[in-house]
Image: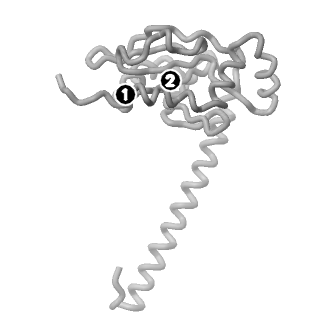
Amino acid sequence: MTDKPIDSFEIFNSLRSEQLDRCRYLMQNVFVYKWNWESDLFVLKDSGFSWEFEIKVSRNDFRKDFTKLAKHRTLREAFDKKLREAFSAKTKNGAMCPNKFFYVAPKGMIRADELPEYAGLVEYERGLGCQTKRDAPTIHREVYDFDRIMVKKFYHRWLNTEARFRESDRMVMYLNEKKRNDPEATE
């Protein structure tokens, strides 16, 4: 057994191995929703429902998550029946949130009574993996067209990557040409 502290990568690997066969898509550190909302682990189930896993490795990291006001307001509005009308109006303008939202942390770091009512809790223990301590309630029942959304995101990411590679190729060609024309030039 190692004394190395548990990090988010270790937790992610455990979650990935448990979720991979139970979903259509699984992506780490991806921006799926609006307002610079990064999902530590985004899972799209075969049902079309999306689950988000927010990985926390310290108490401070957990507390800091609640400074993401737009994210938590959206989750609360989608979950609370009294506020759902406000959420439904926002979805017409592109607002989305997961159908289920979980915090994932080392065992004992977060108490279930500290969680917002819309969140579940998964605990990680080295050697045992992830265990659901509190299941997340279904926040809403809307199913988004993530196939279209993800294709669009990855298409634009590919275009940006392609542009960077082209620019790198141009720079290499320029430096090679400069070197041929001026053998004394340094790199």
Q: Secondary structure at mark 2?
A: strand
Question: What is the quadrant of residue 105 in the picture?
Answer: top left
Quarter of the N terminus within the rendering: top left
Residue 163 location (% of width, % of height)? 58, 60
On screen, residue 113 above or below 37: above
What is the CA distance from the residue labelled 1 to the residue labelled 2? Answer: 12 Å
Residue 53 bears which disc, if any? 2
In the figure, residue 184 lies in which quadrant?
bottom left
Please name the residue shown 39% across and 85% down the image: 179
Residues 116 and 44: in front is 116
Badge 1 density bin: few <14, some 14–19, many ≥20, Cα 10 Å: few
Display colour scheme: one colour
For marks 1 and 2 on the same chain, the one whose residue lies earlier in the sequence: 1
**What residue sits 78% from the left and 28% below the top?**
90
Which residue is denoted by mark 1 in the rendering?
A: 13
Measuring from the top left, give residue 110's x and y in whole percent: 42, 16
Q: Is residue 60 left or right of residue 137?
A: left
Label 1 SS: helix
Q: Nearer the viewer, mark 1 or mark 2?
A: 2
Q: Amino acid at mark 1?
A: Asn
Q: Quadrant of the C terminus?
A: bottom left
In percent of the image, x 50 and y 9: which residue is there? 113
Q: What amino acid type should be assigned to the residue bearing mark 2?
A: Phe
Residue at x 60%, y 35% (from the top left corner): 37
In the image, taking residue 17 as reference, residue 87 lies left or right, namely right
**Residue 123, x across and y down, in percent:** 39, 15
Q: Position of residue 115 (x, y in %)?
A: 52, 15
